[in-house]
Amino acid sequence: MTRSVTLLVVVLNYRTPDMTADAVDAALKEMEELRGHLILVDNDSGDGSFERLQRASQKRGWGDRVTLVESGHNGGFGAGNNFGIRTGLKLVSPDYVYILNSDAFPDKGAICRLVDVMEARPEVGIAGSYIHGPDGAPHITAFRFPTIKGEFEGAARVGPVSRVLDRHVVPLPLPKETCEVDWLAGASMIIRPELLEVIGLFDERFFLYFEETDLCLRARRAGWTTVYVRDSEVTHIGSVSTGMKTWSRMPTYWFDSRRYYFTMNHGKFYAAFATMAHFAGGCLWRVWRVLTRKDRRDPDRFLLDLIAHDLRWRAPNARAAPSYSPLPHTKGGVS
């Protein structure tokens, strides 16, 4: 039986067309009880992905349930999803918007569980799933908002420090049941359109990373809560499009996103102190690692790159206005 709920689903592809097609198949299967439409965005892959997805659509029989579009420009995760949301709002008037990574596959009932929470709790603006790998191992995807103390603890990773700063540790212990959190990873995330009308879409100045942190923080400040839904389970491979698992050094855009997040949400002086705290914690970790013979974990030259990036940060960029806009009249379509 089809529920009287309309869902707009957005899946963003970047050079993983076969895996993306599998993610679309998984999403469509879980949407069978819901009214809705899926927007599949090729984010300027430039490798023939769009044509391969066209063939996949025909071969797999997606029909009019899926609209395949090209963004025309790779502006990153937020920009690509914004493009998909705006495109979808011209076609449907959804009760909820659901963002799914191209390497994420909803398990049975996963999407409906998210919808259930949104239907039952009108104060919830954003909800996300329990994420696990193909081997069943849970992924840490529920977090506290980053703070100066959290930056120090996260870089230090020393037992006594972590115990003292326990309430500031950014990654939360794996929740055992549905609960409110500060922010969630965007691999499987449902959003209330009324929230986007108030706070806007993803800030497109984030190319990659921190964009969902920022969105959840803006939601919190606007009076909405974010919920981690334990019984919505999604299989996630992780870092396929970004190649994060193979990085030897952190890319510049990660530092850009981190600094922009702190500056826009807390001010440039707070951002500077957050970097100083991370540097101090990182130095403490390196001393501790030598004394205890711990394995090295950080990317090459991480602390040097962090400080160098901060020194290059220019005041005009730090004062730049955030790049997001509200969505007028989402219930009645985009005007």
Image (tube, rainbow, N blue to C red):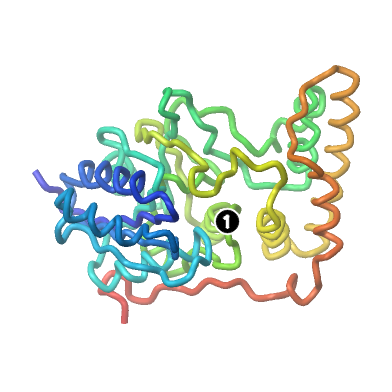
Badge 1 density bin: few <14, some 14–19, many ≥20, Cα 10 Å = some
Residue 115 coordinates in the image, percent (x, y) = 29, 46
Residue at 65% in and 43% down? 247
Quadrant of the image for the C terminus?
A: bottom left
**Quarter assignment of residue 82:** bottom left
Quadrant of the image for the N terminus?
A: top left
Residue at 66% in and 39% down? 170
Instruction: Name the residue nearer the viewer: 166 or 241.
Output: 241
Task: Report the amino acid beneath label 1.
Answer: Leu
Q: Is 124 placed left or right of 107 in the picture?
A: right
Residue at 11% in and 47% down? 2
Instruction: Name the residue nearer the viewer: 124 or 143.
Output: 143
Given the current orientation, which residue lies at the most extreme top position? 292
Q: Is 87 placed left or right of 301 in the picture?
A: left
Decide: is 81 above or below 321.
above
Residue at 44% in and 30% down? 132
Count the marks: how many?
Answer: 1
Residue 280 coordinates in the image, percent (x, y) = 88, 41
Mark 1, residue position: 208
**Quarter assignment of residue 169:** top right
Decide: is 198 above or below 158.
below
Residue 327 coordinates in the image, percent (x, y) = 40, 73
Q: Secondary structure at mark 1?
A: loop
